[in-house]
Amino acid sequence: MGLDNGIFKINRQDLPLEIEDVNIYGYIHIEVCYWRKCWHFRDSLISRASTEDHRLGNSGCYEIDDENIDMVIETLTYCILEAIEDEDDDWEDSDWNRINLANLLLIKEDIISPNPKYRYFFYDSY
């Protein structure tokens, strides 16, 4: 399992929509959310994502868009509210998770706007 997971954004002008499988190292990107060793969240998100049309690409990235942003927010919220803790998970920093949740809400604002500025991708370091 990946130790590091997060969400990064890439300016839409730099990344045309035709490019579906994004390599995080191929573009200038900005990390907007980050988790380390939060395997329950990672597993929950990937499990839910794999039941939809969106899947992790060969690069280990999963695009977050208007069709799945609510699912990503719900998954993180569930993990926070249920306080699912595992001795190997780093969920003790609840402030950090609240910051990530706030950033997801800002991501949603951009995604659902008439002219989104960025494309967003969940990455799995595994």
Image: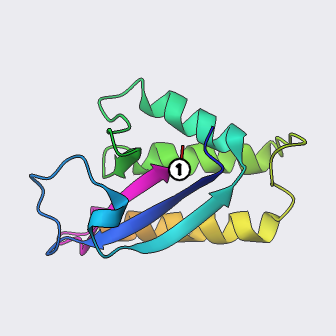
As shown in the figure, which amino acid type bears the numbered disc 1? Ser
Measuring 82% from the left and 41% from the top, which residue is drawn there? 84
What percent of the width, then of the height, locates residue 27? 27, 70
Q: Does the magenta stretch include residue 123?
A: yes
- 9 vs 89, left or right, is left
Image quadrant in which the C terminus is located: top right
Residue 124 image offset from top left, x and y in percent: 51, 47
73 sits left or right of 118 in the view? right
Q: What residue span does the magenta drawing correspond to?
A: 111-124
Residue 17's image quarter? bottom left
Q: Is residue 87 magenta?
A: no
Q: Quadrant of the N terminus?
A: top right
Q: Which residue is drawn at 65% across and 72% down?
A: 99
**Image position of 46 with respect to 119: above or below:** above
In the rendered image, the vertical position of residue 3 relative to residue 40, given as above or below: below
Q: In the image, residue 115 lies at what x, y percent?
A: 17, 72
Instruction: Tell me which residue sits at (38%, 56%) in the image.
Output: 121
> Does dot 1 land on a helix, a strand or a loop?
loop
Q: In which quarter of the image is residue 86?
A: top right
- 113 vs 44, left or right, is left
Farthest-out residue, top: 51
Q: Residue at x 83, y 46 (%)?
A: 83
Residue 22 position in % (x across, y down): 27, 53
Disc 1 packing (10 Å; few <14; some 14–19; many ≥20): some
Residue pointed to by mark 1: 125
